[in-house]
Image: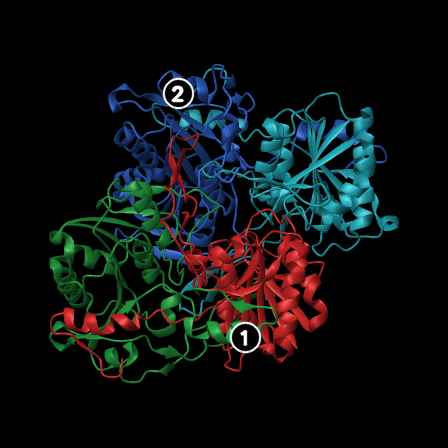
Chain colours: A blue, B cyan, C red, D green
Amino acid sequence: MKILLSNDDGYQAPGIIALYEAIKDLGDVEVVAPEHNNSAKSNALTLYAPLSVRQANNGFRYVNGTPADCVHVALTGLLGYRPDLVVSGINNGANMGDDTIYSGTVGAAMEGYLFGIPAIAFSQTQKGWAHIESAARKARELVQHLVGAGAPESSPWLLNVNIPNLAYEELKPFQVCRLGRRHAAEKVISQTSPHGETMYWIGGAGPAKDGAEGTDFHATAQGHVSITPLKVDLTDHEALRAWGRSVPGAREAAGA
Amino acid sequence: MKILLSNDDGYQAPGIIALYEAIKDLGDVEVVAPEHNNSAKSNALTLYAPLSVRQANNGFRYVNGTPADCVHVALTGLLGYRPDLVVSGINNGANMGDDTIYSGTVGAAMEGYLFGIPAIAFSQTQKGWAHIESAARKARELVQHLVGAGAPESSPWLLNVNIPNLAYEELKPFQVCRLGRRHAAEKVISQTSPHGETMYWIGGAGPAKDGAEGTDFHATAQGHVSITPLKVDLTDHEALRAWGRSVPGAREAAGA
Amino acid sequence: MKILLSNDDGYQAPGIIALYEAIKDLGDVEVVAPEHNNSAKSNALTLYAPLSVRQANNGFRYVNGTPADCVHVALTGLLGYRPDLVVSGINNGANMGDDTIYSGTVGAAMEGYLFGIPAIAFSQTQKGWAHIESAARKARELVQHLVGAGAPESSPWLLNVNIPNLAYEELKPFQVCRLGRRHAAEKVISQTSPHGETMYWIGGAGPAKDGAEGTDFHATAQGHVSITPLKVDLTDHEALRAWGRSVPGAREAAGA
Amino acid sequence: MKILLSNDDGYQAPGIIALYEAIKDLGDVEVVAPEHNNSAKSNALTLYAPLSVRQANNGFRYVNGTPADCVHVALTGLLGYRPDLVVSGINNGANMGDDTIYSGTVGAAMEGYLFGIPAIAFSQTQKGWAHIESAARKARELVQHLVGAGAPESSPWLLNVNIPNLAYEELKPFQVCRLGRRHAAEKVISQTSPHGETMYWIGGAGPAKDGAEGTDFHATAQGHVSITPLKVDLTDHEALRAWGRSVPGAREAAGA
């Protein structure tokens, strides 16, 4: 069992160190992770600059690029073999609902999935690393189950897992959920530099808009570890017909 | 009719200039675009550095950030009003099939959509800007139709449009398509720096894997302008049940 | 007469545009300048990343590097010939006294000088580009004189020129000066990011400490255009003997 | 005795770690060093972006800026006290002759000197860290002598020290030298990116042009540890008169 481990907080983050320690005996685990914090880097790839790979004292390799860069470079040449599983995280903060589309943690896992390799993204629901050992232990349980033939037959698959920051004993069972929805993000935050220039900071995520039962927001709020299977088909299949009718001269393509 | 225009190739790219010229009389069009090429930056947001906004001589504003940053900052404070439409492009090269998830052009449009605003991403299928005026004219036709009550009632919506690099007369009608699929990307490209360090470059996208009738690959290969309605729900709803059964101790959340 | 023109404010800055217009008929003038503001980049070279050179619509070439990078790349391969003169500026603000060691404007000129080519750095004493046309006209006068055999015989030479922001008629004659001295820089400026991190900004330069008659500070305060010939020998020759005596077991090298 | 330690190779480099270990018992030694390799960054300061300071597990603080930024921020607010000595290095490679003007190692020390604090820059003459412990031991001897009232009375002073990569027993005594001169740098190195863009790399330094007896080049080639006292007065005093005569309408300022 060969496992590629990455994240978006950077190779020195407590989350990836704890996860590495928790799963390292489940197979051959190699770490290729970003040099720096790459939160919210989504699936971004670095096309127009070369990437460097370096190795830290603990054997982790790090890349001056994004989470998706790390997995991409690992899978297309750096590793020299094809891993059986790509694991990403544990992230410093939730990746639930609409946030998922921005998440570098999910982006790293999704890159593996797009190469046909099963992948899991792990996040803690609160920032600050409280109970990170507990989260790592829970993550290990899921990985151990899945590498032991416990996964559904259809492959590859992509899981997004969010773990409440609770002591291990307080964590409730895994719950399979859909992604919730958030309200729009908060206002941009302005500061003025000492040179008199306005600087803008991206504001916080909005509050949950759909946090109903069945969502990741709801499950984790109850203390469950949420598991959401993801797919990467952005097509709005249900809307194809309506659009075929609404654009003049257009038609829905046969077979769409 | 207020239109926000962005892209991922940067505010100086021929594609955004042509598109601006083509649609500027359809409403109040404001440009907020990246300072530099941001190809493949997906939905990435810049959380941990401040952003600056500057204005070029032609009135375009540019941001030292990603396409999604541009739209985000515009919508959460910079514009001071809520636009009716977000338009992105015209991109230098195709954004079809699996590429869509990496596209900064789509990322800019998707950011508008996530704020509840209808949005369109335009791309030319080949790099190099051949027939960009033709593409801009076609883009104008679609925008004009949609701002004139031609859109389906459900709102917001998000369209991904790819235009073959053909003379206007050779372009075939719009065709509403699903996204195709690609094979995995090509191998990473290695170079050695003069200092003896290995540098890695992300390789090219793979060839079409599913380019069957009904896909954007197929439509544009025939000379059609492809329109794919997108949605942003990554949940693999069909897999929820199977996963609920497969993880020990887990269950599918009620309401998922 | 072949002239290489660079600066540190970037190829789009009013100072380099005005200077180019003022001197372009004095010879073959080529611009290779930084893409972005590189104030205070001193003599910095970019050793561990590759540089790109692009061309703007007006024919100026720009580099994603420092002022010294621009001149270095131009002289070691990009130009394909050896220019007779390197000119840098006109800078947005003074480069006098101790500031000179930090100046990217001077850094660009010094790079030419280190390659054995005469070089001049021009700066306006106040930021904001007031009377930039006047400064450019004055700069042209000096360049015209020097390219017309008006320079001292010893070559190469390196001049640091500071021009008060005054109307042309109000500018007093050139004055050959030594560099003054400044008091230590002001305190660092702290801000807190929205994420709670402390950010530090380098503070302003200190006030003049030695602005006596004979210095660039004094000359420009009187309305003169200061000219300071520079050399690049950091050795403190006068201190060699004392140090030879003070370090145990050491001796001053014969011939030092 | 309070000592500020910095470098240009980054806080994780073997040179600064060895130097810290060697001198840490000579006083209160604090490290504020760049996060990344900043070779050839000269005296560059970061004026238009905020700097962050972080702390590594070993207590070293690191800054996302240049060597001069590190010392500047430390001295103008971060430390909260005024150190008695600024030490920089040990650098990975020589900083002799004309290279000195580009050196980030010297830039860090010079920043201390410009604030009125005695400063020393240490470099090994060959890259690769061979005999780094030997160099650190030699550096300690010099620091210990100087903090023990062994320095000349005039203060501040600035020393540039280059240590051959030799076993301790093979190192010959300190020798006080002037800076030598180099021939112009080598040609720029071109590569073509996979996208077809030409990339330029700054080439190597030129060979010694003046490596005569009395220079740092000569001393270190003989196995001596070279010490060169530096000053920061770029004025070419001897040329003032000639320039005063050569520029029409100009005169040498009284007192220059």
> Circle 1 is placed at which residue position?
D245
| Marks 1 & 2, CB-CB < 8 Å contact | no
Q: Looking at the picture, does residue B12 appear above or below residue C240?
A: above
> Circle 2 is placed at which residue position?
A220
A28 and C139: which is toward the camera = C139
**Alpha-carbon distance for marks 1 and 2?**
82 Å
Q: Looking at the picture, does residue D169 appear above or below residue A239?
A: below
In the image, taking residue C239 as reference, residue C29 lies left or right, namely right
In the image, taking residue A20 as reference, residue C97 lies left or right, namely right
D94 and B239: which is toward the camera = D94
> In percent of the image, x 65 and y 25: which residue is there?
B80
Q: Position of residue B31 (x, y in %)?
A: 69, 38
In the image, taking residue B81 as reference, residue C85 lies left or right, namely left
C187 and D41: which is toward the camera = C187
Question: What amino acid is found at the position of numbered circle 1 in the picture?
Answer: Arg
Q: Position of residue C252 (x, y in %)?
A: 20, 77
Q: Looking at the picture, does residue C5 appear above or below residue C209?
A: below
